[in-house]
Amino acid sequence: MPINAGFEFQRLEDDLAHAESVSEKIRILQKMLQVGPKHKGAEKLRNGIKKRIVKYKTLLEKEKKAAKGGGRGISIKKEGAAQVVIIGVTNSGKSTVLSKITNAKPLIADYEFTTKIPEMGSMDYEGVVVQVVEIPAIIGDFLEREKGPMFFGIIRHADLIVIMNSSKGDVALVKKELRDAGIRFKGVLVKSTLEPEKIKKKIWSKLGLIYVYTKSIGRGKDHPPVSLKDGSNVRDLARVVHKDFVENFDFAKVWGASAKFDAQTVGFNHILKEGDIIELHLK
Ligand SMILES: Nc1nc2c(ncn2[C@@H]2O[C@H](COP(=O)(O)OP(=O)(O)OP(=O)(O)O)[C@@H](O)[C@H]2O)c(=O)[nH]1
Ligand SMILES: [Mg+2]
């Protein structure tokens, strides 16, 4: 092993733990084979890495098939400002939460595995529509189950994961299954007893979005609001509203948290805050 390879191997292990996608994990593992020890004593280590590469490649294949789905697969088209999935063990209250925060009317029952296919609903947050999907219950070795890869495919592509906080053991099981599928848990834990408004707020605050209002000259604010990534500026808003607004932009007037005073005149680079009201002026 060349000098410093040990250090690089260590760094790759770190990268692996933080990898965002399965394909990235495969790439890192392959690199680990390249730079890692090759002597006889390291055979076990190398075989372990090779096994993981095969596992992740199989997983990618399965998900691809499931997404195409010869009739069996389900892929869910994103709608609204973001797509959120609710996951958890059976009877953890996923459907209960879905029905509390969206317009969906899923079957809620005290027997196990009531929800068999993903259930969808629209959550209204201050006028912004967020898509919420209940994934059927997660069980041990989910990847090996018939529908596991398909459901993991949906979970992987969601903007946010909500895990039902039914018990410590349940949450640990779900997190382990996510880890095994190479999905990093960036999300929130929610108890089904929590008030709907609190659940919605928790979800929204984790999405990294803000909502702002546009207004026309001499009028009140427009409804519904526009959702933007947190940290967006006036140019980002103009882009969402209409391309003419970007091309012919002159200045904007802003009311709200980002403004020093009402009707402050600002330019393209002014950073917006949630609840702002913006009047775009064209040349
Ligand atoms: N005591 C109590 N019961 C709850 C709570 N949340 C849900 N339930 C009950 O638990 C049962 C299952 O709730 P669901 O919302 O259907 O759970 P689920 O996670 O969607 O379950 P499956 O789709 O079957 O996997 C129902 O009888 C609910 O009334 C809770 O916080 N406390
Ligand atoms: Mg359910």
Image (tube, grey):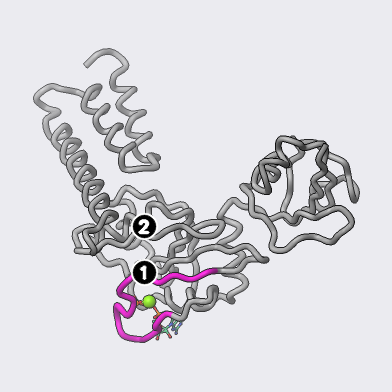
For the residues bearing labels 2 and 1, Cβ distance under 8 angstroms:
yes
What amino acid is labelled 1 in the image?
Pro
The part of the image, by quadrant, that contains residue 214 is: bottom right
Q: In this view, does 220 lie above or below 45?
A: below
Image point 69% across, 63% down: which residue? Answer: 224
* Frontmost residue, 116 versus 29: 116
Badge 2 or badge 1: first in the primary sequence: 1
Q: Furthest-left residue in view?
A: 40
Residue 68 at what x, y percent from top left?
27, 54
Q: Using residue 134 as the reference point, say whether residue 223 is left or right of it.
A: right
Quarter of the rendering occupied by the N terminus: top left
Report the magenta residues as a range: 106-122
Q: Mark 2 points at which residue?
A: 154
The part of the image, by quadrant, that contains residue 87 is: bottom left
* Frontmost residue, 250 versus 182: 250
Residue 58 at what x, y percent from top left?
19, 46
- Cα–Cα gap, marks 2 and 1: 9 Å
- Check disc 2: other Cα within 10 Å, few if <14, some if 14-19, many if 20+: many
Q: In this view, does 252 lie above or below 135?
A: above
Residue 109 at what x, y percent from top left?
37, 86
* Frontmost residue, 45 versus 252: 252
What amino acid is labelled 2 in the image?
Ile
Ligand 1 positioned in quadrant? bottom left
Q: Residue 202 carries which label?
A: none
Residue at disc 2, secondary structure: helix
Q: Using residue 207 as the reference point, say whether residue 168 is left or right of it.
A: left
Q: Is residue 20 magenta?
A: no
Q: Main secondary structure of the magenta part?
A: loop
Q: Using residue 85 as the reference point, say whether residue 231 is left or right of it.
A: right
Image point 17% across, 41% down: which residue? Answer: 54
Q: Name the residue under label 1.
A: 118
